[in-house]
Amino acid sequence: MKPTVEKDVDQPVSKRSGFTLVEIMIVVAIIGLLAALTLPSFAKARTRSLGVRVALDMQTFGDAFIVYAAENGRYPADSHATLPPGAGMENYLDDGKWYEETAIGGNFNWEGPDAYPYAGVSVFDHTVSDEDLLEIDNLVDDGVLATGSYRKTSNGRFTYIVEE
C-alpha cells in the first residue's frame, strides 16, 4: 500500500518568482533613456575619429608630393580629383587609397602650385559641416579654419597645405 500524503489547505500558496510587467517596463524605459543620452556622444566621437583619419591621410599624401618634388625639382601640375597625369605619383603613394571616397565624403584632390598660390592636398566635395571641419582642425592643427596647415581654402575645400 502507498502511504497517503495529506495536503495542508491552510498553507498559503507560494508566490511565483519572476518580474512583473511593470518592473520590466521600468527597466526598458531606463535603458531607452540611457541610449538616448549616449548615442549622440558616440556619433560625435565617430565623426571626430573619421576626420582625424582623413587629416592623417592628407598629410601622408602631402609627404608623398614633397618627396616627389625633392626628387623631381618641382611639384606636379594641378589635377582635379585624379592624380596628376604622367607624373608617376603611383610610385609615391597608394593610388587605391587616393581614389577611395574619404571618411568625410568626397575625394582627395591635388592643388598644384601652377594653379594656386600654394601646393596642397584637399578634399573635393566633402559632406561634413564647417563645425565638423573645425573639430578636425582643433584636433590636428591650430583650431582656426582660416590659418595653419589644415584650412578651408577660398575654393571651399578642406586643404592640407604642403607649401606656400
Image (spheres, helix red, strand yellow):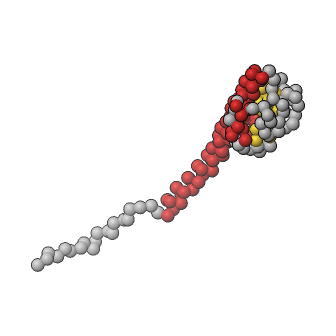
Q: Residue at x 83, y 23 (%)?
A: 164
- The residue furthest bottom is 1
Q: Residue 147, image x and y in percent? A: 81, 27
Q: Residue 51, image x and y in percent? A: 70, 37
Q: Nearer the viewer, residue 62 or 78?
A: 78
- The residue furthest front is 86
Can the viewer see residue 101? yes
Does residue 10 sit above or below 145 in this rendering?
below
Q: Work out which quarter of the rendered image holds the N terminus and state it.
A: bottom left
Task: State left or right for residue 155 relative to residue 45.
Answer: right
Does residue 51 sit above or below 149 in this rendering?
below
What is the count of numbered marks?
A: 0
The part of the image, by quadrant, that contains residue 91 is top right
Q: Nearer the viewer, residue 83 or 119?
A: 83
The part of the image, by quadrant, that contains residue 8 is bottom left
Task: State left or right for residue 43 relative to residue 27.
Answer: right
Task: State left or right for residue 77 relative to residue 132.
Answer: right
Does residue 120 sit above or below 73 in this rendering?
below
Q: Residue 159, image x and y in percent? A: 79, 33
Can the viewer see residue 146? no
Q: Nearer the viewer, residue 6 or 17?
A: 17
Q: Nearer the viewer, residue 45 or 70?
A: 70
Q: Residue at x 79, y 34 (%)?
A: 86
Q: Residue at x 65, y 42 (%)?
A: 46
Q: Residue at x 80, y 21 (%)?
A: 73
